[in-house]
Image (cartoon, rainbow, N blue to C red):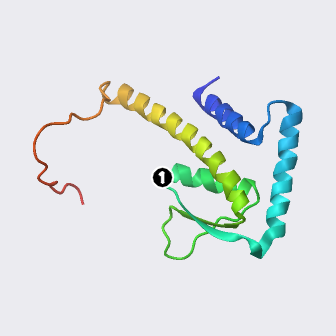
Amino acid sequence: MDERERLLEKLRRIEALHAGATTDGERNAAASARERITARIAAVGDAAEEYHFSLQNPWSHKLFVALARRYGLRPYRYPRQRHTTVMLRVPKSVVDTLWPEFRALDEAMAKHLNEVAEHAIAEAISDDISDVEVIKGHFTGPSEVGG
């Protein structure tokens, strides 16, 4: 099993954990529950509240949007909002379910991406990928680099 397959399997296990599924029967029940959640969300309509999510990187953003769409939600943003912003109009109970699942999936994804980056840097650039040295002294402010 390659790294990609291991990550996908790990993400599936996290999702199954949040759905409470460990067997095929439980997975089928989780799929039915997802359909019921989707139907309940659609029935709530205007009674839902608007929530603002600010996601710090493009991978988290893509993951959150995909997870929301998986549950039949319609993520959006208003003109001039940052691309890291995702808005949802949902009942609070949906956020209470969606957000912990997203956090677990996001943590697994971030850990995997960090491991891949560290491995690639160590292999292609330098095997010393330790953090920078902390030195005694006074910070005088940065000089501009780049533009």
Quarter assignment of residue 119: top left
* Residue at position x 29%, y 26% in the image: 128
Residue in the foreground of this view, choosing between 127 and 37 = 37
Residue at which label 1 appears? 57
Position in image of residue 87 (x %, y %): 61, 67
Residue 111 in the image, given as x and y percentages of width and height: 51, 35
Q: Does 78 appear above or below 145?
A: below
Judged from the image, the secondary structure of the residue bearing numbered disc 1 is loop
Residue in view at x 56 percent, y 75 percent: 78
Residue at horizontal 23 percent and vertical 56 percent from the top: 146
Dot 1 amino acid type: Asn
Q: 94 or 115, which lies in front?
A: 94
Residue 86 drawn above or below residue 104: below
Quarter of the figure with the C terminus: bottom left
Q: Residues within 10 Å of mark 1 (few under 14, many from 20)?
A: few
127 horizontally vs 53: left or right: left
Q: Is residue 27 above or below residue 40?
A: above
Quadrant for the N terminus in the image: top right
Residue 67 visible from this viewpoint: no
